[in-house]
């Protein structure tokens, strides 16, 4: 399974320099620091919808719309739980992924290559 990976800035700079020398650069590069994207052309909720669609292609049992709806409900629940503990209305993406994995297992979704929770969380978060 091919999942995106996080790269160090130095590693990214070296890779871009090598690509540039060959006359080939990527169409997009996503940078994130302190949970704030520097630049985007797609609204945050749209990225979640696109990710749900991609996940639906891997799972083959549920549509992207259903997965997106499940994600939104879990995000809301996690934010509420954090608030009830006196924290901010924030959630951990790995925790969200783990809960989504367990929920999909409970509703008997065939997770195929993503049956292992750690693999699911890693791909979901990357």
Image: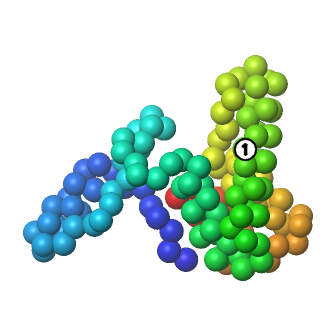
The residue that mark 1 highlights is 75
Viewer-proximal residue among 77 and 116: 77
Answer with the quarter of the image where residue 124 lies. bottom right
Residue depicted at x 71% and y 23%: 87
Q: Position of residue 53 (x, y in %)?
A: 63, 68
Q: Decide if residue 98 is in sight here.
A: no
What x and y, as percent, mark residue 36? 45, 37
Judge whether 111 appears above or below 32 on screen: below
x, y percent for residue 109: 82, 73
Task: State the quadrant of the N terminus.
Answer: bottom right
User: Going by the image, does 114 lie left or right of 80?
Assistant: left
- Vertical comparison of 21 with 12: above or below: below
- 74 relative position to 34: left or right: right
Q: 26 or 120, which lies in front?
A: 26
- Between residue 29 and residue 17, name the one nearer to us: 29
Residue 56 visible to an observer of this rendering: yes
Relative placement, left or right, of 118 versus 39 is: right
Residue at the extreme top of the image, as rendered: 86
Placement of 86 over or under 5, stated as above or below: above
């Amino acid at each position: 399974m091919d999942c995106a990976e996080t790269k160090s800035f130095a590693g990214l700079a070296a890779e871009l320099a090598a690509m540039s020398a060959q006359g080939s650069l990527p169409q997009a590069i996503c940078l994130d620091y302190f949970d704030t994207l520097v630049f985007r052309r797609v609204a945050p909720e749209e990225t979640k919808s696109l990710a749900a669609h991609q996940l639906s292609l891997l799972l083959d049992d549920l549509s992207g719309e259903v997965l997106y709806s499940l994600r939104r409900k879990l995000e809301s629940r996690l934010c509420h739980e954090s608030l009830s503990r006196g924290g901010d209305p924030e959630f951990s993406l790995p925790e969200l992924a783990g809960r989504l994995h367990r929920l999909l297992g409970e509703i008997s979704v065939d997770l195929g290559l993503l049956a292992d929770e750690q693999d699911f969380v890693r791909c979901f978060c990357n």
